Amino acid sequence: MPGEFTDPAQIGGLVVARHEGRAVYVRDLGRVVDGFKQAETISRYNGVPSVSLSIQKRAGENIIRICDECGRCSPRRARVCRPASGSRSPSTSRG
């Protein structure tokens, strides 16, 4: 499948930043290992394995715009999102 890595060394070659005009690679920051890690948490929605996503507002950012953009990334999934208390999900009405 295009876009998938076939060798862990390929991940090490990804540029993640630039510092003083030079590329910083994943391999500069740590080792890339092809293996498994024991799960530390499990997320379920109505008993079905799911993915949890936590979005936090940064100073000066527009949280409504961010939530709307997240909903556009996955509109079908945004319908089932439930906001944490005091927060807004993309499916919440502006009322």
Image (tube, rainbow, N blue to C red):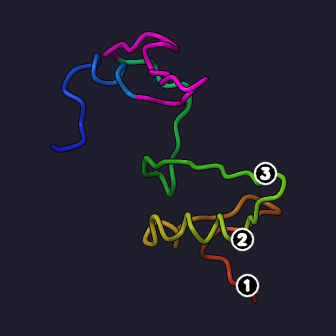
The magenta region covers 15-35
Rounded to the nearest angstrom, the CA distance separating label 1 from label 2 is 9 Å
Q: Are marks 1 and 2 in contact (CB under 8 Å)?
A: yes
Query: In which quadrant will I find the N terminus?
Result: top left
Q: Which quadrant of the view contains residue 2?
A: top left
Q: Earlier in the sequence, mark 1 or mark 2?
A: 2
Q: Which residue, given by chain and number where applicable, does mark 1 sit on? A: 94
Q: Is residue 13 magenta?
A: no
Q: Residues within 10 Å of mark 1 (few under 14, many from 20)?
A: few
Above or below, 71 against 27 in this view is: below
Residue 8 percent coordinates (x, y): 28, 19
Comparing labels 1 and 2, the label whose residue is closer to the camera: 2
What residue lies at 76% left-to-right and 89% top-to-bottom? 95
Residue 34, magenta (yes or no): yes
Q: Which residue is mark 3?
A: 58
Residue drawn where x is 63% and y is 64% of the image: 82
User: Rounded to the nearest whole Å, what is the CA distance between mark 1 and mark 3?
Assistant: 21 Å
| Of residues 82 and 22, the one drawn nearer to the viewer in this rendering | 22
Marker disc for residue 64: 2
Q: Secondary structure at mark 3?
A: loop
